[in-house]
Amino acid sequence: MDFSSELIAEGVKEFSKLPGIGKRSALRLVLHLLKENPDYTNSLADNLKKMREQIKLCKLCYNYTDTEICTICTSHKRDKSVLCVVVDTRDIMAIENTAQYRGIYHVLGGVISPVDGIGPQDLKINELLARIPNSEITEVILALSPTMEGDTTAFYLSKKLKELGIKTSTIARGIPVGGELEYADELTLGRSILNRTALV
Amino acid sequence: MDFSSELIAEGVKEFSKLPGIGKRSALRLVLHLLKENPDYTNSLADNLKKMREQIKLCKLCYNYTDTEICTICTSHKRDKSVLCVVVDTRDIMAIENTAQYRGIYHVLGGVISPVDGIGPQDLKINELLARIPNSEITEVILALSPTMEGDTTAFYLSKKLKELGIKTSTIARGIPVGGELEYADELTLGRSILNRTALV
């Protein structure tokens, strides 16, 4: 595309670096900024810079936080004996939205993936293992995606946690609530039969 | 959604103000910024601010430009006797991409729309009419969208331009190149028959 202005071209370049934003969407965003008052762009830019500069990782669970220790780790209402291991902060938000979990979290920052050159030392695994002794934690729930890498990471962690005498579990795999049986893939359906739940 | 951090919530709020970006996409963008180096966010923010501050409207055609007069208006290769009236800078980009037009432009900034309270005085219409006397312009092409508002604006302009003794035309309406006749709407097909082109 040929832009009438170098400045527009640069703005489009900046926006299209973001995930999920192509050149056309980027141009749309740029023209939106140009149409609005300059204060609008300044507020956007300054708030993003402020966010990036001031945000911290919680010293306990490695979730994003505005303070040294995050609100979940400091809360007196949370059950400190159950810890849920997740990949990133989005997973915490998803689990929090269910309102079914009152324990604490630990953010790994990724999964073990030899193909991408990510080993256990690249994740917050040592930090997790160091956190457990001298804590109230008795159970660790591994809430990782059911992919090859997620399962590998879960297996690695469960071995390490067993050495510490910690009870581990993974979130249940099965037919989604509201899902149709006939459309479920064989693997999920197979697992849902193997891990059937007794009716009481 | 419940964010673990006020700063994240603010970042999401800022991004979701942009057109076409919902809360979920905004969160994705925020987490992307947080994952990357802080320099990345600073570069994004600074470049957007710079763009918004330094961009100007061309004093002749009101297109966005980095200089007082835009590159099209100053170019010696353009035909200064033909002027194309468009709504915004995106239309100029689209026409420039066709490489079929070598004249100059005039950006109206919108169309006459009584419903939205936009009258002729809110657009660059007086600037257009003032531009024509003492210029080389002999023909004005109205390249407005074939909507009710676009047609109203074209009608208004053609009346005003006729008073100045300027030849006016609108871009052709008809079946798009590669379009199927049977899928064309009645209005377009009707216009394409009325405005048929003689074969030579």
Image (cartoon, coloured by chain):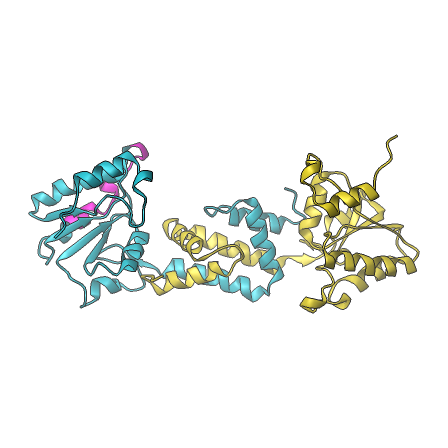
Chain colours: A yellow, B cyan
Q: Is A6 positioned to the left or the right of B61 in the image?
A: right
Q: Is A34 positioned to the left or the right of B34 in the image?
A: left
Choose between B16 and A143: the one closer to the eye.
A143
Q: Position of residue B91 (x, y in %)?
A: 30, 52
Q: Is residue B8 above or below residue A127?
A: above
Q: Position of residue A118 (x, y in %)?
A: 71, 67
Choose between A60 and A42: the one closer to the eye.
A60
Q: Is residue A43 visible?
A: yes
Q: Is residue B159 magenta?
A: no
Residue A198 placement: quadrant: top right
Which residue sits furthest top? A200
Choose between B91 and B120: the one closer to the eye.
B91
Residue B151 placement: quadrant: top left
Total numbered badges shown on the rendered structure: 0
Q: Is residue A172 visible?
A: no
Q: Is residue B124 magenta?
A: yes
Residue at position x 87%, y 60% in the image? A159
Residue at position x 62%, y 60% in the image? B35
Residue at position x 66%, y 43% in the image? B2
Image quarter in which the N terminus of chain A is found: bottom left
Residue B145 placement: quadrant: top left
Q: Position of residue B80 (x, y in %)?
A: 15, 60
Q: Is residue B75 above or below residue A65?
A: below
Q: Position of residue A114 (x, y in %)?
A: 72, 67
Considering the whole magenta stretch, tell me its main secondary structure.
helix
Q: Is A26 positioned to the left or the right of B42 in the image?
A: left
Image quarter in which the C terminus of chain A is found: top right
The magenta stretch spans which residues?
B115-129
Choose between A136 and B198: the one closer to the eye.
B198
Q: Is A186 positioned to the left or the right of B40 in the image?
A: right
Residue at position x 81%, y 59% in the image? A128
